[in-house]
Image: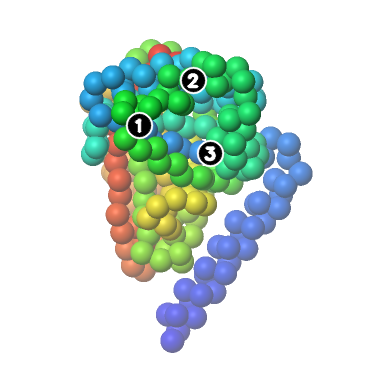
Amino acid sequence: MQRRQFLSASLATSAAAIAGKAGAQAGNARGREYYQLRRYLLQSGPQVGLTEHYLNEALIPALARRSMGPVGAFRLDIGPETPAYYVLIPSASVESVATLDLQLSQDAEFLKAADAFWAAPATANAFVRVDATLLAAFEGWPRVTPPDSKAKRIFQLRTYESPSFRDHVRKVEMFHAGEFDIFKAAGFHNVFFGDTLVGARMPSLTYMLSFPSLTELDAHWDAFRNHPDWKKLQADPKFAFEPIVSNITNLILSPLPSSQI
């Protein structure tokens, strides 16, 4: 009973702290962003070139006209179900990302540029399936942060699923309790952190990191795992009372030429 009361009281404190941060940013015009994360699942062959052309020449320019960006456009290099492209679409408005396809269907310039993809016949479809997830940026990392360097880079997209909503809230709190800073201390470039509002396999969160190479990815993760602040945070009873992450999806992506991230 005491353990249950401790967890309930601690969770209430965490929720209050997060709500307080949200309220503090409510009047900030540059408050946290909302993201639509799309996956275009393709078949090898014409679909790959058709989809890349659509992203480069139709979708990303249409998003720029709506002041939505920077947009990330990526090829899946390591992960299940390839070929696939991932697109990260940021906006200050949750409505604009939630109703994006309805807006695009009224954009004559977009429809002209997108026609080969948008109106592909059933006998030569442009993709296998498109999945989309709606996310809210973490209060402690409210906006996309593209890498400063224009040199060749790779990106790691990670999704954490939790066994309960309580555990999910705890994992989000763990990032705000020091995990952002430990990532930076270990040499990571943090791109975005998002809490899933609508999507599959909830409750979950998704974040993206960037590295110059796979070799540096491995070296930075070793530095992270061995960092004394991570060991201390990981052992904190607030987060160590049970496994608060039940599944991790880990993808390696490379940016397309049109990517703004």
Viewer-side residue, 218 vs 55: 55
Is 102 situated left or right of 207 in this image? right
Name the secondary structure under disc 2.
helix
User: Residue 66 placed where, x, y %?
Assistant: 64, 25
What kind of residue is marked 2?
Ala
| Residue 17 rendering spot, x and y as whole percentages | 61, 59
Q: Amino acid at mark 3?
A: Tyr
Residue under the image location 40 percent in, 52 percent down: 200
User: Residue, x 43% and y 58% (percent of image)?
Assistant: 203
> Is label 3 in a helix, a strand or a loop?
strand
Residue at the spot of label 2: 114
Residue 131 horizontal/vertical position (percent): 40, 41
User: Which quadrant of the figure has residue 96?
Assistant: top right
Residue located at (76% from left, 44% from top): 27
Distance between mark 2 and mark 3 Cα atoms: 22 Å
Which of 156 and 239 lies nearest the eye of the viewer? 156
Q: Which residue sits furthest right?
A: 27
Residue 191, how many percent across, how many down?
Answer: 46, 32
Give the total of numbered labels. Answer: 3
Discs 2/3, front: 2
Left or right: 54 as drawn, with respect to 14 = left
Q: Given the image, on which type of amino acid does mark 1 rest?
A: Ala
Name the residue that disc number 3 marks. Answer: 35
Q: CA distance from mark 3 to mark 1?
A: 30 Å
- The numbered mark, 2 or 1, whose residue comes first in the sequence reads 2
Residue occupying the point 46% across, 26% down: 118
